Amino acid sequence: MLYLLALIFGVFYTLPSIILACLQFRYIRFRMEQPPVILSPKDYREAGEYSLAKLKVSIISSVIEFIVFLFWVTIGFWMLGNFLNSLDFSETIRSLCFVLVFLCVGSVISLPIGFYTTMVLDKKFGFSKSTLGLFIKDTIKGFAMLLVIGGIIVFLLLVVMDHFSYWWFAGFVLIFAFAILTNVLYPILIAPIFNKFTPLNDDVLREKIEAMMVKVGFKSSGIFIVDASKRDGRLNAYFGGLGKSKRVVLFDTLLQKVSQEGLLSILGHELGHFKHKDILKNILIVGVLLFIVFFIVGNLPQSIFEAMGVPANPAATITFLLLISPVISFLAMPVMGFFSRKAEYRADEFGASLTSKYSLAEALIRIVNENKAFPCSHPAYIFFYYTHPPLLKRLEALDYHMEK
């Protein structure tokens, strides 16, 4: 049974991830030798080198993830269960600790990769502005949130599993409801833990943004600038929250590097997502994915847990759910990506209608230049991983032609 689990994880997740990364690696290295597009020759090469470096990290991460999976299903769960059973805790506390220890171990294992990406790789290419102190502070905050919020969710899920025959359905309802609640609370409670949000003090720009929002019936709780530059030099903007918590968030880096017309076109694109109810559609897709994960885990044979040396109790079931969820998410990505790319084209069209095709195209090019995103990708990599169409395709849809 353990061999079968390892085979499923390796064949349907680890191996495809590595193959796709290798295909992308070879493709980018080939395109780097071709005449540059969108970016200047210097930025084109630098963007390619950054993408290649990230792909190397991705391959290493995939290998580590497979090794960690093998550890948990062979001796990890058994060791953790025996250790907690030796402690004089109630069954509920032991179950809660079982899941939280599993989550914390995963976070600790991912720390070296996260540190290297943020403090070494991103700094080398001029993206990361984070200091060691800030990285440590963010890590501590992340762990604290994992223990507090994760502890609450796990506890409620354990209660559901103890009191419902069809616990997997009740658990799905609980987690789906929590995901919606997170969308509501994130911009007003969670995001401010890591960043400072200040109201936009440019009256002219604010009036223009508000006029655009009125056109599409978007009501927000405010327009805010986030101090993203203290961590990262890349550009972005988004509409966060649901209901009354909706707000417009502009990265301070975006205000510094993109013209006002370009900024309005980017926000017009985001308003297009609101107009077409893409956020609600994404929530629905996440709900379907969660339902599938809970259904599969809720109907697993006991022999799987016996093979791992643990009883088929709620704690073991939750950790196993977390352990295999990357496989299901990976297999669902092409479907999610397909609908997401369609949504991006529609949002581009809508954003261009509020400003102009030219201003949106120029803004997108500006973002790619500043973010040094390599503009070419292997079709298979796009199919699996891209939630946005390649920029050249978006420019083509906007009838924008690059100067030769």
Image: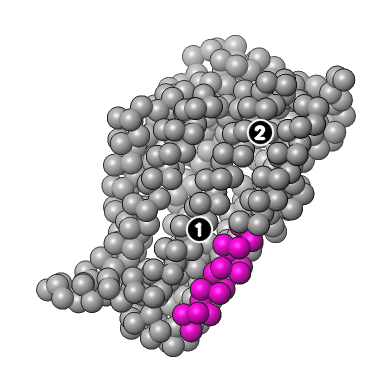
Q: Identify the image quadrant of residue 290.
A: bottom right
Evaluate whether residue 356 shows in this view.
Answer: no
Image coordinates of residue 316 in percent, x first then y, are 36, 75
Q: What amino acid is labelled 1 in the image? A: Val
Mark identifier at residue 185: none
Is 70 displayed left or right of 392 in the figure?
left
Q: Residue at coordinates 57% horizontally, 30% vertically from top-left?
A: 237
Dominant SS type (magenta): helix
Is 370 displayed left or right of 111 in the figure?
right
How far apart are the alpha carbons under marks 1 and 2? Answer: 23 Å
Choose the circle earlier in sequence order: 1 or 2.
Answer: 2
Check the picture and name the quadrant holding the C terminus: top right
Is 12 displayed left or right of 261 in the figure?
left
Is 236 displayed left or right of 224 in the figure?
right
Q: What amino acid is labelled 2 in the image? A: Gly
Q: Give the colour scheme shown.
A: one colour
- Span of residues in magenta: 1-17
Q: Secondary structure at mark 2?
A: helix
The residue to which callout 1 is attached is 63
Q: Secondary structure at mark 1?
A: helix
Q: Is residue 262 magenta?
A: no
Evaluate whether residue 128 shows in this view.
Answer: yes
Image coordinates of residue 2 in percent, x first then y, are 46, 80
Camera-nearest residue between 224 and 60? 60
> Is 228 rendered above or below residue 331?
above
Camera-nearest residue between 92 and 50? 50
The residue to which callout 2 is attached is 48
Q: Identify the image quadrant of residue 36.
A: top right
> Is 283 rendered above or below residue 246?
below
Q: Is residue 5 magenta?
A: yes
> Is 9 rendered above or below residue 30?
below
